[in-house]
Image: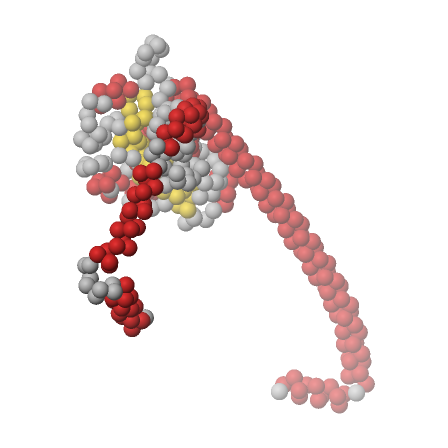
């Protein structure tokens, strides 16, 4: 970019020189085009004023009337044309700042509201606690029932085992008699048993 | 110093109602039956809320805001988020109108006053039918208010609790008068 800029500067000089046919910078020929532009702008201004008052005389009166009807204040347009958030804009005709509660009646109404709210909360808490308590008791009762059932089952099985034990003991007695009988018939085997019991 | 706004009054009453219940009405009841009789009002100064007699509050108007340190009884302070925090200085007011109470035995007094919670072994008596997370005022066995807290369990549940289980979470205790001596009272502005 830099080199191109320098080139433009050079070109400007070149163009100036080109425009200045005489070669002198502040000569009349060089200043002429500038003065022409100014004179041109002045000319319409000079010409302008005479027709304007003629037009405004009739139109301005009507415009003024219209403007008076729709003033900015009446429209409620903010002084600066900026976007204001919905919450920020304050309602008209209301007290600025905080609204205090100092009279007894309004305090009592707030108090009643708060109290009712708290009562409700406490009541619901108590209800919940009672329900939970009921559920807990029901669970406890169920658990106790189960324990009893298990105990009963255990007792039954114990009884069953005891009964079973009694039967084999009766059989043992019979066996003993048989052994004795056997011992009576076969003394040799008894001797062997005695030796085993000693060891 | 200024009166409370509606929102502030609501937060304050909601907090006080945790401990006092229905008897909160007595706080703002007129002191005598005359039409322009004196009564107690709430005032805010430096985010601290004071419970003060109206006549005194009217007198205090003559003191400029930056020079006024405190007046009446300080109940607590409003936090920057708009919540209300009760101070131990509100204990006399809470104790007078307490709904649920808890009495600690002699062995639990000192631990409580040093800032610990109340365990079941230290509880001498408690109010019946007290729900969970409910504000209670803690008393010693000779009915001296020691502080206030929040129940950890309902009374029914607390009965089944083991002796080392916490029954009441401490919120404020009288030991704060010594421990928080620097910050409890507004001494500078």
From the viewer's perspective, tell me whether residue B158 is left or right of residue B73.
Answer: right
Q: In the figure, residue B184 lies in which quadrant?
A: top left
Q: Nearer the viewer, residue A99 or A120?
A: A99
At x 26%, y 34%, the residue is: B46
Which residue occupies 24% across, 59% down? A30
| Whole-percent x, y for residue B185 in the image | 23, 36
Give the residue furthest to the top: B34
- A107 relative position to A4: left or right: right
Where residue B27 appears, as percent x and y from the top left, is 36, 23
- Residue at position x 22%, y 64% in the image: A22
Task: Say whether residue B23 is visible.
Answer: no
Looking at the image, which is closer to me, B8 or B157?
A: B8
| Quarter the C terminus of chain A occupies | bottom right
Is B131 placed above or below A7 here?
Answer: above
- Foreground of the two, B137 or A72: A72
- Measured as percent of width and height from the top left, residue A93 is found at 39, 24
């Amino acid at each position: 970019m830099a080199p191109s800029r320098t080139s433009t500067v050079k070109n400007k000089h070149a163009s100036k020189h080109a425009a200045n046919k005489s070669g002198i910078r502040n000569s009349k020929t060089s200043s002429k085009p500038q003065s022409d532009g100014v004179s041109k702008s002045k000319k319409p201004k000079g010409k302008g004023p005479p027709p304007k008052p003629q037009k405004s005389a009739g139109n301005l009166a009507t415009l003024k009337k219209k403007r008076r009807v729709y003033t900015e204040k009446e429209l409620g347009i903010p002084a600066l044309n900026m976007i204001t958030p919905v919450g920020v804009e304050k309602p008209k005709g209301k007290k600025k700042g905080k609204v205090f509660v100092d009279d007894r009646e309004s305090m009592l109404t707030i108090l009643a509201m708060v109290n009712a709210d708290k009562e409700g909360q406490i009541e619901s808490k108590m209800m919940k606690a009672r329900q939970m308590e009921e559920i807990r008791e029901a669970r406890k009762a169920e658990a106790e029932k189960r324990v009893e059932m298990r105990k009963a089952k255990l007792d039954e099985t114990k009884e069953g085992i005891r009964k079973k034990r009694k039967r084999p003991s009766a059989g043992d007695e019979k066996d003993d008699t048989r052994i004795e009988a056997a011992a009576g018939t076969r003394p040799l085997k008894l001797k062997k048993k005695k030796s085993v019991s000693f060891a | 110093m200024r009166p409370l706004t509606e929102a502030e009054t609501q937060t304050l009453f909601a907090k006080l109602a945790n401990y006092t219940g229905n008897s909160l009405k007595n706080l703002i009841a007129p002191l005598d039956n005359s039409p322009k009789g004196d009564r107690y009002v709430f005032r805010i100064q430096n985010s601290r809320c004071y419970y003060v007699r109206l006549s005194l509050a009217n007198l205090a108007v003559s003191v400029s805001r930056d020079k006024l340190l405190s007046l009446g009884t300080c109940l607590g302070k409003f936090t920057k988020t708009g919540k209300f925090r009760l101070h131990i200085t509100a204990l006399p007011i809470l104790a007078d109108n307490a709904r649920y109470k808890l009495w600690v035995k002699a062995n639990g007094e000192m631990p409580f006053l040093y800032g610990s919670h109340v365990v079941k072994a230290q509880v001498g008596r408690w109010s019946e039918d007290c729900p969970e997370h409910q504000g209670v005022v803690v008393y010693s066995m000779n009915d001296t208010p020691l502080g206030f807290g929040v129940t950890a369990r309902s009374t029914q549940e607390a009965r089944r609790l083991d002796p080392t289980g916490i029954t009441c979470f401490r919120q404020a205790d009288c030991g704060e008068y010594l421990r928080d001596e620097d910050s409890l009272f507004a001494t500078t502005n």
